[in-house]
Image: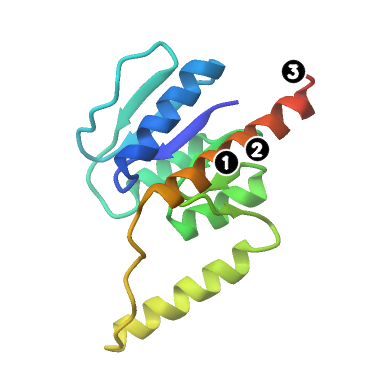
Amino acid sequence: MRIWVDADACPAPIKELIVRTARRLRIPAVFVANKFISIPDSACVSTVRVELGPEIVDEYIAKHAEPGDFTITQDIPLASVLVPKGVTVIDPRGELYTEENIRERLSIRNFMQDLREAGGITPGPRQFGQKEKQRFSDTLDREITKRFKLQGN
């Protein structure tokens, strides 16, 4: 079990929470980014810096994540690749992507992108705050607990 983090756009409070979780539970966490990111030093935490490019981080995570791993990303196309592989995917606001909801999320994302490309104005993301951080924490804890129970730990 490993936690993969799409770190370029991950909010700092979520990165901190992931580091604390990795240390506490001794789960390796890998922060993947195409720029320098500052992550506290820990035996359980590492960073991978990939080349600049629009999908390089996503491709790296998709290639290396395995069934039973976790990925933290707000990238819905990446989630749509990982979920069928058996990777648990959570966005930084605490939404769990599943086999049941990923197609709908991808469809909405694609529709909104098409709308923007056609000149439409779409709302930006909601502000990130304590409520979102707590929801993420709750979702991550719940899903890790499930995984430990499945593994008999």
Q: Nearer the viewer, mark 3 or mark 2?
A: 2
Label 2 residue SS = helix
Residue at 41%, 11% in the rendered image:
43
Q: Are marks 2 and 1 in contact (CB under 8 Å)?
A: yes
Q: Decide: few, some or many residues near mark 3? Use Cα within 10 Å; few <14, some 14-19, many ≥20.
A: few
The earlier-in-sequence mark between 1 and 3 is 1
Distance CA(mark 3)–CA(mark 2): 14 Å
Q: Amino acid at mark 3?
A: Asn
Extreme residue in the top direction: 43
Q: Amino acid at mark 2?
A: Arg
Residue 142: assigned label: 2
Is 46 above or below relative to 15? above
Q: Quadrant of residue 39?
A: top left
The quadrant in which the C terminus is found is top right
Residue 82 at what x, y percent from top left? 57, 48
Residue 13 at what x, y percent from top left? 34, 38
Does residue 49 appear anywhere in the picture?
yes
Q: Quadrant of residue 44?
A: top left
Residue 153: assigned label: 3
The earlier-in-sequence mark between 3 and 2 is 2
Q: Amino acid at mark 1?
A: Asp
Distance CA(mark 2)–CA(mark 1): 6 Å
Residue tagged by mark 1?
138
Q: Is residue 12 left or right of residue 43?
A: left
Distance CA(mark 1)–CA(mark 3): 19 Å
Does residue 66 appear anywhere in the picture?
no
Q: Quadrant of residue 116?
A: bottom left
Is 149 above or below relative to 33? above
Q: Decide: few, some or many residues near mark 1? Use Cα within 10 Å; few <14, some 14-19, many ≥20.
A: few
Label 3 residue SS = loop
